[in-house]
Image (tube, rainbow, N blue to C red):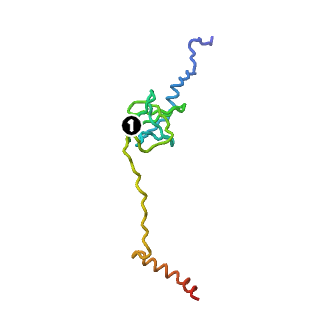
Amino acid sequence: MFSLPLNNTKTVFEKQPESTKINQILAVLSTRKIDSGHCIRYKNKYYIPVTKNGVKTYLKKGTTAMVIESFEGDLYVNVLDQLFVMEEIPEHEKLSKTFDAQYEKPKQRKYYIPPMSHPWKHASYLNYVAKQKHRMDGANV
């Protein structure tokens, strides 16, 4: 008399989303800029965008890129609505040997220290000598 038909009850549990859907939902997105070495810095490491065919992509300095870190830990970069895989570079070069001109580092500047006979130091030197007279008097005795 108080029973319900079986067809009216629905399950309250939902289907678990596929792993690719979970990977997309839990991804971390962050914006970065391409540096002068055609690389992206992410978590203190340098990466270069690589196509799905394995060809490295050299992008213009200052180009804005969206770094995508998936839930599984894979790194991707979206530049101008194109998706690239990020490949880690063991040593980062600030300038590209093939694309940038030869760059010479400037020489380290030697700082000028004026001598004690310099006119600006004369007053401070006389004050220093006046404070040291007690040492001079004790040496003559």
Q: Quadrant of residue 117?
A: bottom left
The one nearer the camera, 122 or 72, is 122
Provide the residue designation for mark 1.
Answer: 59
Q: Is residue 109 depicted above or below 57 in this figure?
A: below
Question: Residue 57 at x, y = what percent?
Answer: 41, 33
Q: Quadrant of the C terminus?
A: bottom right
Q: Quadrant of the N terminus?
A: top right
Question: Residue 106 at x, y = what percent?
Answer: 40, 54
The structure residue drawn at horizontal position 45% and vertical position 39%, both measured from the top left corner, is 40
Give the residue type at disc 1: Leu
The structure residue drawn at horizontal position 53% and vertical position 27%, both measured from the top left corner, is 22
The one nearer the camera, 50 or 18, is 50
The structure residue drawn at horizontal position 44% and vertical position 75%, both measured from the top left corner, is 116
The structure residue drawn at horizontal position 47% and vertical position 38%, both measured from the top left corner, is 47
**Residue at the bottom extreme?**
141
Q: Is residue 13 depicted above or below 46 in this figure?
A: above
Q: How many marks?
A: 1
Q: Is residue 93 depicted above or below 112 in this figure?
A: above
Question: Residue 95 at x, y = what percent?
Answer: 41, 44
Q: Is residue 8 left or right of residue 83?
A: right
Question: Residue 18 at x, y = what percent?
Answer: 53, 23
Mark 1 element type: loop
The one nearer the camera, 76 or 99, is 99
Q: Quadrant of residue 5?
A: top right
